[in-house]
């Protein structure tokens, strides 16, 4: 690939619950690709907008909830200015629109590398029990609720403590009914219905980041153990681990579903060595730069797949590579903030 690529990336909110955009861009910039990076932001204070040397230009986008017409119109305007080759969306809540408009984007000349709508829908938190049965995977007992009244009559063996999870984001561990009702209202108001109840399982939180080529092949996969977890359940520190069983489960899921694009498998490993899948995130996770540091540049590989290149699978990675997130006070000028607020671009 000799031409200079223009790659648009969302998820620039590098805060306490970080979006994957900044580490995705870092991975692309660490590659041999000749690129121009366009940042797509939903809020005018997303730190990635202002980080020196990260993006070449940023545009504000309307929230996906604003409606598909406004969303597509804005993307079309940005494309007319920037001639985007590839767009990498990094939020669950925006993926539906990017998948839905894949054909329209292709006609414009914008490429993506995302799961199909069927793949996206069947791995939803609310569909996880059916997914597990279909693909022969262990998952904790769970149920999707559309009414707060159903909290009073949960089927056995669901008992306290359990996790209550939002449709797209956020999960809270609850130990009594008053907590459960509080978080049900909070999550349903923020993310909509259903709200998912999932049995808490004691064990170690382990994750895999992976990339499927859409034909059943695992192009990349790196497992890690969370070392430091925030109160929002986000990994603030982690380390790559050797775990062949986790990789077997990952390859099995990608082969069975013919998964297309990036994904994150969140699992619990119990003391007796059992693995329970608790969530599938249908995109690159925020800790992707650990995979880059371990020898698998997943953002680069995803860009190449989007451009129609054949990418050779990488089956090795460095064990014992660690990441730690940190806060950094970024100093800027109010004039930059004014430009993004007034003009919607910087």
Image (spheres, grey):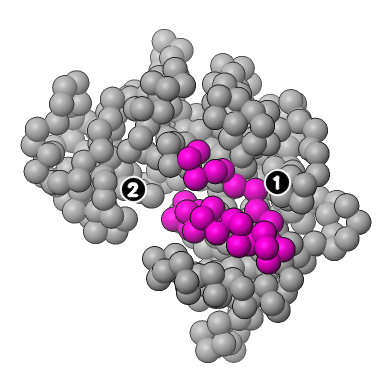
Q: Percent position (x, y) of residue 346?
A: 64, 81
- Return the disc, 2 or 1, that comes first in the chain's sequence: 2
Q: Which residue does the numbered mark 1 point to in the structure image?
A: 302
Query: Which residues make up the magenta segment?
Result: 91-119
* Marks 2 and 1 in Cβ contact (< 8 Å): no
* Residue 176 visible in rendering: yes
Q: In the figure, 189 relative to 120: above or below? A: below
Q: Residue at x 15, y 26 (%)?
A: 155
**The quadrant where residue 248 appears:** top right
Q: Percent position (x, y) of residue 315?
A: 74, 25
- Distance between mark 2 and mark 1 Cα atoms: 26 Å
Q: Residue at x 72, y 74 (%)?
A: 82
Q: Percent position (x, y) of residue 26?
A: 70, 55
Circle 1 crowding by C-alpha within 10 Å: few under 14, some 14–19, many from 20: many
Q: Percent position (x, y) of residue 33?
A: 83, 54
Please tell me the numbered disc located at residue 26. Answer: none
**Going by the picture, which residue comes out furthest to the right?**
2
Q: Residue at x 19, y 53 (%)?
A: 185
Q: In the figure, 217 relative to 107: above or below? A: above
Please name the predominant secondary structure of the magenta segment in the image: helix
Circle 2 crowding by C-alpha within 10 Å: few under 14, some 14–19, many from 20: many
Please tell me the numbered disc located at residue 167. Answer: 2
SS class, disc 2: loop
């Amino acid at each position: 690939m000799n031409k200079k690529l223009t790659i648009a990336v969302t998820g620039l909110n590098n805060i306490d619950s970080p979006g994957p955009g900044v580490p995705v861009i870092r991975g692309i910039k660490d590659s041999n690709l000749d690129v121009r990076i366009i940042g797509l932001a939903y809020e005018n204070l997303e730190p990635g907008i202002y980080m020196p040397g990260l993006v070449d230009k940023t545009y504000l986008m309307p929230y996906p909830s604003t409606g598909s017409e406004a969303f597509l119109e804005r993307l079309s305007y940005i494309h007319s200015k920037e001639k985007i080759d590839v767009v990498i969306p990094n939020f669950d809540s925006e993926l539906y629109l990017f998948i839905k408009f894949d054909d329209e984007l292709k006609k414009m000349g914008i490429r993506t590398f995302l799961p199909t709508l069927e793949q996206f829908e069947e791995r939803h938190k609310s569909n996880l029990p059916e997914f597990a049965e279909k693909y022969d995977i262990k998952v904790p007992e769970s149920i999707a609720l559309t009414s707060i009244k159903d909290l009073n009559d949960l089927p056995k063996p669901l008992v306290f403590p359990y996790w209550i999870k939002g449709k797209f984001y956020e999960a809270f561990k609850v130990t009594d009914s008053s907590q459960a009702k509080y978080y049900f209202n909070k999550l349903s108001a923020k993310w909509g219905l259903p709200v998912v109840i999932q049995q808490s399982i004691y064990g170690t939180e382990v994750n895999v980041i992976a990339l499927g080529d859409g034909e059943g092949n695992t192009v990349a996969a790196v497992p890690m153990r969370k070392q430091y977890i925030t109160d929002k359940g986000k990994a603030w520190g982690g380390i790559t681990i050797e775990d062949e069983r986790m990789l077997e489960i990952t390859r099995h899921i990608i082969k069975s579903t013919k998964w297309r694009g990036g994904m994150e498998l969140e699992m619990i490993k119990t003391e007796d060595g059992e693995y329970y899948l608790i969530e599938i995130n249908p995109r690159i996770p925020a800790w992707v730069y650990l995979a880059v540091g371990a020898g698998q540049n997943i953002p680069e590989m995803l860009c190449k797949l989007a451009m129609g290149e054949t990418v050779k699978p990488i089956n090795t990675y460095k064990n014992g590579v660690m990441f730690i997130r940190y806060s950094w006070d970024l100093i800027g000028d109010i004039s930059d903030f004014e430009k993004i607020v007034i003009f919607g671009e910087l």
